[in-house]
Image (cartoon, grey):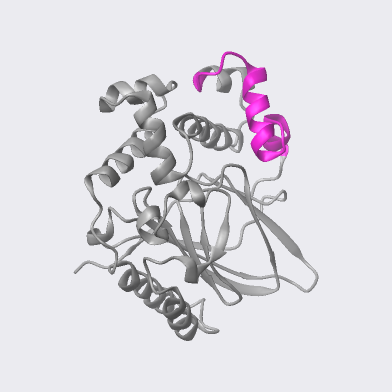
Amino acid sequence: MSEPRPIDHEERAHLRDERGFSPPVHRLVPSPDLADHVRRFWLPVWSLPPGEVTVQRVLQYPVCLLVVTNHFATLVGPTSGLSTRELTGSGWAVGVMLQPAAGLLVAGRSVDQLTDQTLPITEATGVDGGRLTDDVRRVVGDSADDPDVRMQAVLLFEEALRALPPVDDEGLLVNAIVEYAEGNSEVQRVSQVCEKFAISERSLQRLTARRIGLGPKWLIQRRRLHEAAERLRGPEPPSLARVAADLGYSDQAHLTRDFRKVTGLTPGEFAAEPRA
């Protein structure tokens, strides 16, 4: 059986802190047999000087997360706004970004009940969260810098996730819908998603509520913001009017409104922040 393998690119949803800083984040794709359930694993490791604080910012995808750290273990529902995490001292985390289809299987309930919620991992009824937490903490301990230890922790996650049932046809459909909406810049209207998958808008609304906890319009807006953030942190200052037009906004003001509503910053303010 193939093992998880490292990802060598930075995640565009990760905005770093306002200084452009991020601790090292080790990312891995799952073993092939879990591809319908898992998008990727990520393992940040940090050690900050006394008194220093970093607030990491992420424009999350429409998925649930399972996270085990040396201090807490949680089931994280889909986040409609900006996800932030304050880091101090030294620590580590082992997290799994689930596929859209897997949230319901892991949580044991409709995902719209989890939107913008963070719960103890023991409430994830599809896995043995208590055992997983104990096993990961025992393996990682104080050795999170060791790549072999990190791989062992990921394999423990995979072992726990293999207890889930196979993804059903509805789950495969929602995985495909999210992949289509996220991966195609030309998708700018919900009607395009409906046409692609021969589904009514009402049925699409019900499906996305149950399986990802967010509506199809959100999918399109979040992809636009991911693309905007990626362009804004490039080496050359972009034309905001050009970015807005390329992403399908009617004008620059609409891009600015959406970006500020979610991140708290205007595109110009974000572009002016230091880069790593």
Range drawn in magenta: 246-272
Can residue 72 be seen here? yes
Q: Is residue 164 above or below residue 195?
A: below
Give the quadrant of residue 2. bottom left
Is 52 included in the stretch rendered in magenta?
A: no
Identify the residue at horizontal 22%, vertical 44% (top origin).
169
Can residue 94 be seen here? no
Q: Residue furthest top?
A: 250
The dominant secondary structure in magenta is helix
Residue 206 vs residue 216, the one in the foreground: 206
Q: Is residue 172 above or below residue 203?
A: below
Residue 104 vs residue 155, the one in the foreground: 104
Give the quadrant of residue 69. bottom right
Identify the residue at horizontal 19%, vertical 69% (top origin).
1
Give the quadrant of residue 184. top left
Residue 71 image position (x, y, % from top left): 61, 76
Identify the residue at horizontal 71%, vertical 30% (top origin).
268
Left or right: 228 in relation to 5: right
Left or right: 21 in relation to 204: right
Residue 78 vs residue 97, the one in the foreground: 78
Left or right: 54 in relation to 36: right
Residue 168 vs residue 93, the one in the foreground: 168
Residue 5 image position (x, y, % from top left): 32, 63
Q: Is residue 233 above or below residue 126?
A: above
Identify the residue at horizontal 55%, vertical 33% (top origin).
225
